Amino acid sequence: MRLFVTQSKYEDRLAAAIESENHCTSQSRLLIDQISIQQGTIVSLQEQNKRQSEECRQLKALLEDLERKGLKKLVDKVPVAAVVIMACNRADYLERTIESVLKYQSSVASKYPLFVSQDGTDPNVRSKAMSYDQLMYIQHLDSEPVHTERPGELIAYYKIARHYKWAMDQLFYKHNFSRVIILEDDMEIAPDFFDYFEAAAALLDKDKSIMAVSSWNDNGQKQFVHDPYELYRSDFFPGLGWMLTKSIWDELSPKWPKAYWDDWLRLKENHKGRQFIRPEVCRTYNFGEHGSSMGQFFQQYLQPIKLNDVKVDWKSRDLSYLMKDKYTKHFADIVRKAKPIQGTDAVLKASNIEGDVRIQYKDQPDFERIARQLGIFQEWKDGIPRTSFKGVVVFRYRTTRRVFLVGPDSLRQLGIKDARNI
């Protein structure tokens, strides 16, 4: 009987051992399956690590290249502004822009240290930028996926906005510049480009109602401009070759938009009643027919732009008329002297009158009708026509005469009391 009990105990232990072995075998198979599944993840992580190592190698090479060029210490003097060319994947365009900038920057390099900021990894753009000893190359590497807010939107506009924010943060906060001039990789500059911005920098420092200075006039086509010395204040942000200060960037950087940064900057809630300086004759020329905007408006508005070819001595020019406390009166005096014309044939009448003329528009549709007849930009943003000051759009028309398109409330804002004559 005792032997039987002992035998039964061993049989139970054996059965438990076999069950335990089967369980271990099952667990082992499960672990093998999990390891097999995770091998793909491991391989993916290894590839990611390899890419990151390559990026680190590139950045190290860039640092060594910068040190070789002696650009780590950018300048001995305090510069007027850093100049950055925003680039992505158009090496041929970038070369044309760099060559145009260097043509006039070389003699003032210490005042205007030059950067190329590339978004992405296009090897041709990188090698083209790094082939120039006269500039510093920085690279924006962004692996975050882009989620557009509306169906059908181009991802490019989101990537551009990210790149701009990154580049401005680099130049203002890492390199500690007080001002930055932003160019794009499809621009040529005028002979007096740098002298113009140096004179404008003094205005920016003195007058905090000026948000930025631009080298661009949206209505700067050959048939609408004449005087290379004339500058204006505008309520509409022009962009396309512009300068801002660190204090303005301190305000904009934390709330920078996900996309369409230029139109965002044209919203009243962002420019807050501040204005922009622009020239009559452009100091930049945009040759980029192919790009993110798909060549929009190029044939009609960009290709005919007049690039200034006069070397204006801006240091000898008195620009105090552009200060806030003087400009409204200055501009009002010019508008007041213009001959008022009216009627549906006002455009025809303007062609037959000597001297400056002014035409009043009733509202946005009326403005668009008149602008269409004249061939100027019809577009508004947030209630403001392109290039306008107090609702007034000014341009030359066929001769040296100026045409002023005057809004329904413009004369009151300018303090002009002879509204009955319009």
Image: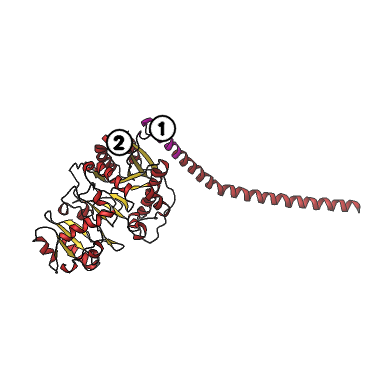
Q: Position of residue 44 (x, y in %)?
A: 50, 45
The span picked out in magenta is: 55-75
Residue, disc 2:
109
Q: Nearer the viewer, residue 344 or 16?
A: 344
Q: Position of residue 319 (x, y in %)?
A: 24, 48
Magenta span has 153? no
Q: Is residue 151 left or right of residue 189?
A: right
From where the camera sits, is residue 416 visible?
yes
Image point (61%, 47%), residue name? 32
Q: Position of residue 277 (x, y in %)?
A: 27, 51
- Here the colouring is secondary structure
Residue, disc 1:
64
Q: Residues within 10 Å of mark 1 (few under 14, many from 20)?
A: few
Mark pair 1, 2: CA separation? 21 Å
SS for tag 2? Answer: loop
Magenta span has 60? yes
Q: Amino acid at mark 2?
A: Ala
Q: Amino acid at mark 1?
A: Glu
